[in-house]
Image: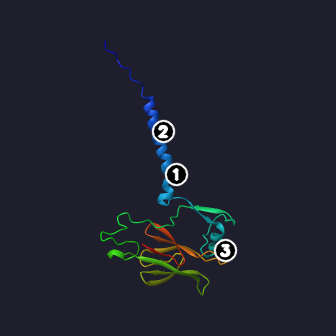
Amino acid sequence: MMHKQKRGSGSATALAIVMVGLGLAVAWFGIAPAVFGAGANPYDATLIAEAAPQSAPSGNVSQLVAGDVVASNLQTSQPRDPFRPLILDDGTANFGPGSGGRNGITFKVSNIQTDSDGVLTVEVVLNGTTHIVGVGDTFAGSYKVISITPPDESAGTLGRAVFLFGDNAFEVVEGQEILK
């Protein structure tokens, strides 16, 4: 005599699939911002308010209050090219510009100062060529200055500037050099 097996409705399997999917989604949203640098970066409104008089937009704009935090999705660290190996075939490391026969563009903010007209300018050294530019200026073909924050000696912070290259915004601190 053969017994006929009764098949379940599959609700346990469906519940297991939903739970695994939910677990993966929670892990993705928890880990991805830290890994890919897509998290919100808070900026102190005090620093923004100090820089605002130079490039304040016209129209009905609410004022920032000191202590407010402004969130931004600005990526402050530069992504690494996943196709450029860190260790070359000959065993040498490929961490700096030009190492291993690979050249890149070196981008350095060497100084942030106020010019003779009282306008903040940033001194950028791009592959050895110095450019002194202000907010809104385009230089070296594709780079544009978005904002400049002066150094604050009382708070012990360095100056910083935000640039746009194509549709990629990046921030460089005074004295910092990056490879683009």
Along the viewing direction, whichever of 15 and 49 lies nearer the viewer: 15
Q: Which residue sits at x=43%, y=32%?
A: 13
What is the spatial separation of the Cα atoms under label 1 and label 3, in whole angstroms? 32 Å
Q: Which residue sits at x=51%, y=47%?
A: 26
**Residue 75: image location, x then y, percent:** 50, 64
Q: Residue furthest top?
A: 1
Characterize the local packing of mark 2: few (<14), some (14-19) or many (20 or more) Cα atoms within 10 angstroms: few
Task: Answer above or below: position of 115 versus 25.
Answer: below
In the shown orientation, is residue 106 left or right of residue 49?
left
Coloring scheme used: rainbow
Q: Secondary structure at mark 3?
A: loop
Along the viewing direction, whichever of 45 and 13 lies nearer the viewer: 13
Please tell me in which quadrant of the rendered image residue 154 appears.
Answer: bottom right
What residue type is disc 1 on?
Gly
What residue type is disc 3 on?
Ala
The residue labelled by disc 3 is 155
Q: Residue furthest front?
A: 91
The residue labelled by disc 2 is 19
Please tell me in which quadrant of the rendered image residue 96 appears.
Answer: bottom left
The residue labelled by disc 1 is 30
Q: Residue furthest bottom?
A: 116
In the shown orientation, is residue 149 left or right of residue 144?
right
Say which label, 3 or 2, has the lower sequence index. 2
